[in-house]
Amino acid sequence: MTVSASNARPRRRGILADQIRATSGHAQGLLGGGLLCVVVGLTLVSLAWTPFEGNMFDIANAYAHPSWHHLAGTDEYGRDIFSRIMVGGQASLGISCSAVALALVVALAVGPLVGYFGGALDVLATRVIDIVMAIPALVLALGIVAVLGPSGPSVTIALAFAYAPTFARVFRSVVVATRPAGLAARP
């Protein structure tokens, strides 16, 4: 038995394929995606190799201009700027990925529960989320870092706390839209 073309289900593309197709006609999207891939790639390469040690002093080469030997030049202490950028990317990507993961964990714990059970808990949680979202995320994160002190973990916690309400609101709205009709009228 053969399946006719009209009865066949269309093949579902992946999320990445959809994103590439959506940005393929936009130069800015391609440039941003390309730069992101370069930064992530260089950061991953720096885990195993860098042209120079990131903190190696070489006063004789202080303020060297970019060349084949030092791709981005050197700073006032003769440290290779390109190597320092590669090593610095490790901290930046580590903090940002950790912050997003922590924000997702918190939002996945709060959003669906509040959306499913509804009632006074839903109203209270929604108001708290609205209040936190009324404060700009960067200002909120800076305030949290000021309280916790300047360190990588405090920046991770601050960014997670600043962005978790946005994720929680989305998760809550999906649960509210898909929960059974009998639960929608609960007091």
Image: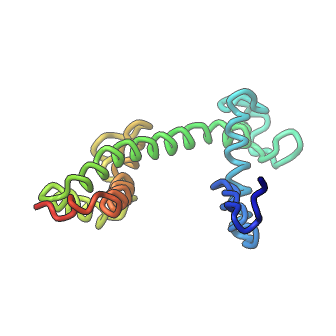
- Is residue 77 at all visible to an observer of this figure? no
Q: Position of residue 140 (x, y in %)?
A: 32, 56
Q: How is the image coloured?
A: rainbow
> Nearest the camera: 10 or 57?
10
Q: Residue furthest front?
A: 1
Q: Nearer the viewer, residue 170 or 36?
A: 170
Horizontal side of residue 98 vs 187, given as left or right = right
Task: Give the residue drawn at x 30%, y 61%.
Answer: 176
**Residue 172 at x, y percent in the picture:** 32, 57
Q: On screen, 121 above or below 58?
A: below
Marks counted in the figure total: 0
Up the image or down, 153 lies above or below 34; here it is: above
Image coords of residue 169 (percent x, y): 33, 60
Q: Is residue 55 visible?
A: yes
Residue 154 is left or right of residue 6, and the answer is left
Of residues 6 and 111, the one drawn nearer to the viewer in this rendering: 6
Residue most toward the right? 68
At x 89%, y 43%, the residue is 68
Picture residue at 61% right of the left edge, 40% below the top = 88
Given residues 1 and 144, the one toward you in this image is 1
164 to the left or right of 59: left
Asked where in the image residue 59 lies, by quadrant, the reply is top right
Instruction: Identify the image quadrant of residue 132.
Output: bottom left
**Image quarter hosting the C terminus:** bottom left
> Residue 60, relative to residue 147: is it above or below?
above
Residue for point 19% across, 57% down? 118
